Image (tube, rainbow, N blue to C red):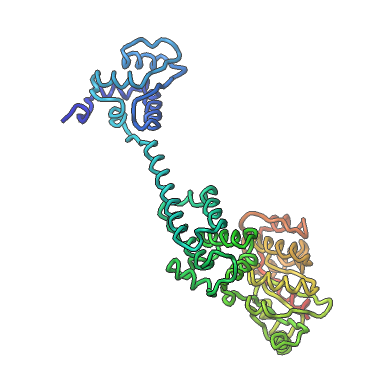
Amino acid sequence: MSSDERALDAGTLAFLTRPGLTRLWTAARTRLERNGLRPTGTVRLQHLDAPEREALSLLLARPVTGPTVTIGLPDLDARLRASAAGRGLAATLEELGPPLTDRRALRDAAAAERAHVWSTARTELESTSLSSRPWAARWLEDLRRGGTLTRQDPHTATTVVTQAIRTLAALFPDGEAHPAPVSWGRGELATRVTGSAHGLDDGTLLSRLVLRGMALAHDTDFPTDAPTRRALWRAASVSPDEVSGTVLTYGLRPTGDTWQEKALRERADHRRETHLTLRDLRTLHLKMPPGTRVHVCENPRVVEAAADTARTAPLVCTSGSATTVVLTLLDALAASGCAFAYHGDFDWPGIALANRVTRRYAAEPWRMRAPDYEHLATRTHLHGTPRLPLTGPPVEAAWDPELAPAMEASGIALHEEAALDLLLEDLG
């Protein structure tokens, strides 16, 4: 067994671990880990106290008398080898623990892995129809500079950028941004490229990379909301799923003469609710009678009760969130000149949703002011209804600065069903 492999004897270990040497070992460890574990350069210790000066003097075999000392790591390495430690600085620090980390080697390895990601991506790009297109080269360079993939592990980064290139090559088989000869369903395209029908779903890293490339190919801005994302997919001959998401409606009576408008009026006449998809809304001409006032609620129970009691006012339900299909319908109704009244849950998510709808459509609050909340809170208390605690961070109501303080003071959340009888009166 070599001297560097033998364990330190108890006396040497006790000396090297004395408190007066702690700062030296910390500084030396930091320097070695930066230097590729080579004992080069110096460390400087300031504001030395008496125990530190004594310990350093014994270790270095020279007097340390001032408040500051500069120690050359080559000298320290040689001194340790010649001492009872019988090993160099790196081996000594390993023995004292914890193990040293060669940070320079880690940086070099990480840099090599990143370089491999981009060399693989460039090779993949050059093998496709995109190789001669300036927009594709710019897209790849923007990705490299932007750091989006740098935050991923190398395997994930390589996989995603390769899949993105293959997706764009499928969409632009000759590299040009015109409708592709093949029309894709987004799930079908995702399955071909990734093996999963959800590989290009909104919010995935792959979909963001592909959309960025598509935007460059079409010389347009990167889409920042669901409608513009869908428009960009369609421009590349990709059909997003437009049938799974629906918006719940009741009592809509558009004035058009197509079978769709007639069907809506007939369902309204028969007091039946209607679920509309994005595909419906793309072809539906929602021209409404002048001055139509549309009530917007949050919970489907309001629509159900309106139908059961033969109410006549037009009603749209967000079902708890302003999804793309909900906003698409409300946008179309707003464009036809409709005015809106909004009611939702008296809890913080409900207020946040109400803020979004009232701001976007200048909607009138519908029994959603502080007195309305206080009346309902009092009524539920008198009826002995169990209290539902109000939880989460408060949200100020854009239409009534008194509402949030009233809700905080009471501490009760009230769902829309608590006001159902009052809402039905208004829908008559």
Q: Quadrant of the C terminus?
A: bottom right
Point out residue 53 in the picture as x, y percentages from the top left corner. Answer: 39, 14
Question: In the figure, 163 relative to 104: above or below?
Answer: below
Where is residue 41 drawn, in percent x and y? 39, 23
Percent x, y for residue 172? Answer: 54, 66
- Who is closer to the viewer here, 386 or 218? 218
Quadrant for the N terminus in the image = top left
Along the line of sight, the residue nearer the viewer: 126 or 89: 126
Above or below: residue 58 compared with residue 268: above
Where residue 158 appears, as percent x and y from the top left, is 43, 55
Query: Which residue is rendered at x = 77% and y = 69% of the image?
Result: 366
The quarter holding residue 312 reads: bottom right
Q: Is residue 319 above or below residue 93?
A: below
Residue at image position (66%, 62%) is: 347
Q: Quadrant of residue 135?
A: bottom right
- Answer left or right for 13 relative to 356: left
